[in-house]
Amino acid sequence: MMSPRISLLLSASALLAACATTLNAPTLPMVDTHAARTMVAVHGEALWPGWAEDDRAVLLVAKEAEYLLCAPQQQGFVAVGTEPVTGCSRQTRPVQTPADIAAPSEIGDVLVASIGLPDALGADGIDWQLTLAHELFHSWQDRMPGYNAAVMEVTSRLAPADAGDAGWMLTYPFPYAEAATAEAFAPMAAAAHTYLAATDQAARRAAIVDYLAARHAAEAQIGHEDWLYYEFQAGQEGVARWTELALAQRMAQDDPRYVDAFTERRGGLATSLRAIDRQGIGMWRRNVFYVYGAIEADMLDTLDPVWRLDYPARPFALGEHLQQRLD
């Protein structure tokens, strides 16, 4: 007997194939939009309880207009009926958003995943689907119980007194270029490489133990305030990158087209570590923390997948989550 999950996936695949030539497919990636929303509907609940039930609103930014999908009617948008591929309500307005956006955005009273078209992002097909799923996760993060309180706590400690918006999150003066920073991260990188190359559970656990020791030493060397910024970016963006990887892995179990996407993203973690070592943390800046955050989320899932239930209340404490599962 076919499982409900496989049945849903096959039904979605049939719908995607049937809709591939519908009226707006040549200009708007509606088939891939539907695929991204479907992968969250099928696999999101197993990763993050409640995510599959989220409205998963999307803002598609095209050259001629913006299209808001799956959201309540918003001021400044004109309703244009139901979008046939996704089955969602559709609204439109003149372009107000950068064409290459891939980020959550507030539109009226709704947080949506805003995304440019494939040619603007340099990604298409499955890669574009997973990019959209990544941004849908960011929208869901904002609705996790306790998540916004954690963001406000970090903001109160790190944002400049005159910060008028969230821009400080991108411009925080972390000591990226200092030699001491590279020295602090080097043992973490070595242990992370060992973890990613490990082929059995015992070797992975041993690498995690070494990684956590190096992580504690790095925090002591860099300082607690600057380290909080690392925790913030690792917990916010790094976990989103791991979620993208985890979705690809689960999709690959039923659809071989996603195998390469998972393999590339998993292998990309080690590739990024090597590039950071070669090019320097000063060049990569906060993107370094995204890589380490994704690796730490993977370590946590190796140790205990239940960590995801604890994440919303303490999203910027991946080190504490790791220590808790090793004690």
Image (tube, rainbow, N blue to C red):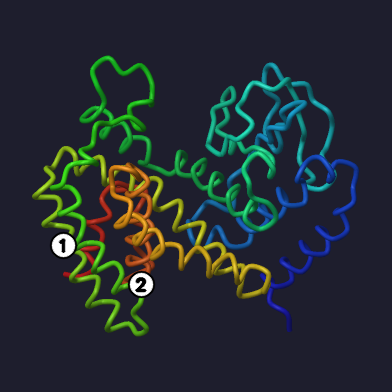
Question: Residue 326 appears at what percent x and percent y?
Answer: 20, 70
Q: Is residue 305 left or right of residue 322?
A: right
Q: Is residue 72 left or right of residue 321?
A: right
- Secondary structure category for the residue under label 1: helix
Per the image, the residue denoted by label 1 is: 214
- Secondary structure category for the residue under label 2: helix
Q: Which is more toward the observer, 257 or 315?
A: 257
- For the N terminus, the quadrant is bottom right
Q: Give me the residue at 21% from left, 55% from top.
A: 185
Amino acid at circle 2:
Leu
Question: Residue 52 appears at what percent x and percent y?
Answer: 58, 53
Amino acid at circle 1:
Ala
Q: Are marks 2 and 1 in contact (CB under 8 Å)?
A: no
Q: Give me the residue at 60% from left, 47% from top.
A: 132
Query: How far is the residue under mark 2 from the one under mark 1?
Result: 16 Å
How dense is the environment of label 2, judged by Cα within 10 Å: few (below 14), some, or many (20 and up)?
A: some
As drawn, 216 above or below 199: above
Q: Earlier in the sequence, mark 2 or mark 1?
A: 2
Per the image, the residue denoted by label 2 is: 196
As drawn, 48 above or below 69: below
Question: Residue 182 appears at what percent x and percent y?
Answer: 20, 51
- For the C terminus, the quadrant is bottom left
